Each structure stands twice: as C-alpha cells, then as structure tokens.
Amino acid sequence: MSVGIGLNKSQTMIFVTFRYLPGYPLSTLALNLYLCRVTLSLKLSIRNMDYLILLYYCYTPIEEPEAFREQHHLFCLSLNLRGRIIVASEGINGTVSGLKEDCEKYMATLKADPRFAGIDFKIEESPKHGFQKLHVRVKPEIVHSGLTHIDPRKRTGKHLEPAEFKKMKDSEDVLILDVRSIYEHSIGKFKNALTLDIENFRDFPEKVKELEKYKDKKVLTYCTGGIKCEKASAYLLEQGFKDVYQLHGGIIKYGIEEGGEDFEGKCYVFDGRVIADINRVNPKVISTCYVCGVENDRMVNCANSVCNRHVPICENCGWEMEGACSAECKEHDEKRPYDGTGYYAKELNGYNPLKGLKRK
Ligand SMILES: [Zn+2]
Ligand SMILES: [Zn+2]
C-alpha cells in the first residue's frame, strides 16, 4: 500500500490516493496516514507565518531620549508595530511584532541610523501579532539593574556567538551562569547552569557575593536576548572575576543558530507566546505542574489578576482550576475567565495608541 497526498493550487482541497500492495500491514497504513496529517498541519502552519517577533537592544548614546521617543513612537505606529520599547540615554531595548514587510522596514531603518549600526535583531516567525498594544517609554536604564554607573560600551564580558558558546560550555573550567529570575529559569535553562534565587534582575548584584568560589573559573553568562548579560558580565568583571563571557543574542539566538542543544525546558518570553521552544536537538522537560506535580512545561499566568503568578500548570489542572494556581485564587473575585491559554492580555479599555505623544 502506498499513500500519496497533495494540495491543489488554492490549497483548499486535499487529495489522498491509495495503492494496495499485497502483504502490506494495515498498521503501517495508519502510521502513514498519521504522518501525512502531521506533515500537512506543519505545512499549513508554516504557510501562515506572516508576522515576525523581533527582540533587540543596543547600548548607544541617545542625546534627547524624550524627543527620540516621540519620533520613534510615531514611526512604529506608521508600521503598525506593537510591543514594548524602552528608550534611555544609554540606548534602546525592545520587543515588537508586526507583518514581515513592516518589521523588515523597521530593522532596515534602525540599522541605517549610525547610532544603531551595531544592533542585532533576534527574529522569530509568528502566525500573529505577539502584542496587543504599543508602548514606547523613556526610563533611566534600558534594563532595570540599578547598575547605572556601568557602561557596557566601555567594559563588558567577551561576547560569544552561539557556536562558540556551544563549544565552550562543557569545559571543566567553565561556570555557566543564568542571570535571569526564578520564574524564567524554573521553566528552562542550560544543562549544568547555575541559577540564582532572584525575583528580579535588580537583585543580581547582591547575589554575586555568593559566587566568590567561582572566581577562578571562566564564567559564561546568558539570558533571554543578551541584554541583561551586558551589565551582569560587566559587573562580574568589576567585582574581580577575571575571565567573563556572555552569550551574544541570548537563548533566543542560540535556539535559532544552534538548534538550542542542551537547553533544557523552554524559554520564558515577554510576548503573547509566554514560552518559546528553543531546543530542536535534545529537548527535555524540567518543570512540573504547580498544582499536581506532574512533569509539565505549559507556562501560564494565574487567572487571579491580583496573583498573576507565572507558573507551569498542566492542561488538566488548567481546566480544573479554571486557570488559577491555588484554591484561594480559584475563588478570588478578580479571577479572569480562563480560555485554555493562561495568557491574559492587559485590558485594552482606554488604550490609545497615540497616548503619550506631544504632537497629536
Ligand atoms: Zn497538573
Ligand atoms: Zn494564583
């Protein structure tokens, strides 16, 4: 028996043809049909990846952040981009989504600006926008660390491209250091990485005191997109660590370029996906359902908006608990309706894309 499958031009009709060869077991037919279905659904989903999700940062002096913010906000609106961008006098940090051609235009325009010549975009495809709104804000730092005195353009850990990181990470004299917060590394991290018990990146400097015993090792830091490592690795150097490296482009770029080998679990991201698949080489689940304890890597936000805890909750518990992380949260007045995703877009009520603009 052989099974053929094809799509017509408009891809609305599916042809399945069967040819019977005597002696061919029926279970193989079932498997073939199953594989066809899998291939078909993959093809259909690839076809609809019309959007991109960009993740980027650039440490570069921005002379008048407020004026830049204003103009950048308008520029993003003109391209129908959505997402979050932080502007500071030390640079820009953003994650936005939009149609492919709009994102291409955005990237080309930024790269053409000499201030952002060194910018590196992590680009992922998506079937839809990753965000509902656009926010462009001015803040004192592009990532809140409290380390305002550190300028990564002057001194920071050596950048390792994903391929170099992969080669170095298993050496005896290396410490792989995850500089992200608990809710991020609890769902996924590099094999053998040291993780820190921190709720927020601004607690990182305090934790460095506990790393004294690793001072003679080569320290390889990593984070989601590379930005936290710029200051984290610079701070380690300042604290007397001699040989400090950082994964350039973070976990996201490592996933794109190296198939995510040895990244265990999934990567917490800041768009509507909540988590992203990184490892296509040797994937593994490292987290367990917060409610029932079974192995699980489905990350959700607790449906109780007051709690909003980011935890893994399995499909079953999700429905049973109506998206809540505990019995108390399930009964809470502020519990939002659960739709099976565990992601709650912030209220669009009152959102005005032009908000914050001085020239209306
Ligand atoms: Zn469960
Ligand atoms: Zn909760």
Image: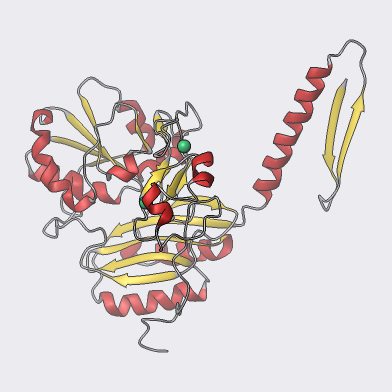
Residue 347 screen position, x and y as percent? 45, 70
**Would residue 314 appear left or right of 173 to someone viewing this image?**
right
Q: Is residue 88 above or below residue 258?
A: below
Residue 241 in view (yes/no): no
Residue at 28% across, 31% down: 193
Residue at 36% across, 81% down: 356
In the displayed orientation, state which residue is furthest to the top: 23
The quarter of the rendered structure image containing the N terminus is: top right
Residue 258 in view (yes/no): yes
**Would residue 21 appear left or right of 294 to someone viewing this image?**
right
Residue 221 or residue 105, whichever sits in front: 221
The quarter of the rendered structure image containing the C terminus is: bottom left
Q: Is residue 346 above or below residue 269?
A: below
**Would residue 353 appear left or right of 8 to someone viewing this image?**
left
Residue 6 screen position, x and y as percent? 83, 39
Tally the marks: 0
Task: Name the colouring of the figure.
Answer: secondary structure
Residue 318 screen position, x and y as percent? 50, 45
Residue 190 screen position, x and y as percent? 34, 32
Residue 100 or residue 355, whichever sits in front: 355
Residue 1 or residue 27, whichever sits in front: 27
Residue at 92% across, 24% down: 19
